[in-house]
Image: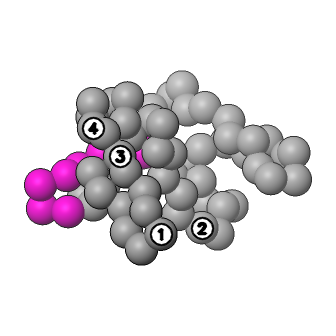
Amino acid sequence: MSSPDNLPFVIMANGSRVLAHGVGTIDLFPFLSIDNVLYVLEFPFQLLSISRLSRSLDYVIFFTQSFVCL
């Protein structure tokens, strides 16, 4: 994880703004990694933006009642 000088603010669900602490890459699967992932210390969950994923990787994403297909 790198810590560039120009990290963005993230707006939390309660409307507060917190500064991202770093940016890095995560591996979802052996064949799928995502770049420019923000590390926000104050956020207790790991979220994935489906629209950002589909734009950055040029994937089609299908949701059904029981699974997700990339």
Local SS, label 1: loop
Q: Mark 2 or 3, which is nearer the eye?
A: 3
Residue shown at 43% from the left, 57% from the top: 63
Query: With respect to residue 26, does 45 lie above or below?
Result: below
Q: Amino acid at mark 1?
A: Gln
- Between disc 1 and disc 4, whose residue precedes? 4
Q: Say if mark 4 contacts mark 3, CB within 8 Å.
A: yes
Q: Nearer the viewer, residue 38 or 58?
A: 58
Disc 4 designates what residue?
A: 59
Q: Mark 1 or 2, which is nearer the eye?
A: 1
Q: Amino acid at mark 4?
A: Tyr
- Between disc 2 and disc 3, whose residue precedes? 2
Distance (Cα) linking label 1 and label 2: 23 Å
Q: Is residue 10 left or right of residue 12?
A: left
User: Which stretch appears magenta?
Assistant: 29-38
Report the number of discs: 4
What label sits on residue 65 in the rendered view? 1
Q: Mark 1 or 4, which is nearer the eye?
A: 1
Q: Colour scheme of this structure image? A: one colour
Disc 2 designates what residue?
A: 45
